[in-house]
Image: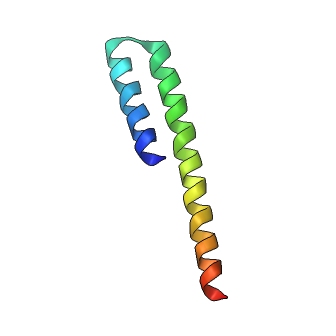
């Protein structure tokens, strides 16, 4: 997830530099969503793996 978020952030930066505002904003939105989903999944994975070890 984080790999794809970084890729979309890079696409947004390049598109913004080249003047493609619509593509830049769409790519930035997708990157933000992927980063948030990746962070949530990482936290859930960490919490569930810790709980499993205690049993």
Left or right for 1, reference 55: left
Q: Residue at x 50, y 14 (%)?
A: 22
41 shown above or below 11: below
23 shown above or below 2: above
Instruction: Residue at the far top: name it.
Output: 19
Q: Quadrant of the C terminus?
A: bottom right
How far across and how far down the image is residue 39, in percent?
Answer: 55, 53
Instruction: Residue at the far bottom: name it.
Output: 55
Name the image quarter holding residue 42: bottom right
How far across and how far down the image is residue 33, in percent?
Answer: 57, 38
The number of numbered badges drawn on the structure is 0
Left or right for 43, reference 31: right
How far across and how far down the image is residue 46, in percent?
Answer: 56, 69
Q: Residue at x 64, y 71 (%)?
A: 48
Q: Residue at x 50, y 22 (%)?
A: 25
Q: Residue at x 63, y 87 (%)?
A: 54
44 shown above or below 22: below
Colouring used for the render: rainbow
Q: Nearer the viewer, residue 6 or 52?
A: 52
């Amino acid at each position: 997830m984080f790999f794809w978020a970084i890729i979309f952030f890079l696409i947004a930066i390049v598109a913004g530099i080249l003047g493609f505002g619509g593509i830049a904003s769409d790519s930035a939105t997708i990157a933000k969503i992927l980063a948030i989903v990746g962070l949530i999944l990482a936290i859930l994975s960490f919490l569930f793996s810790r709980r499993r070890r205690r049993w």
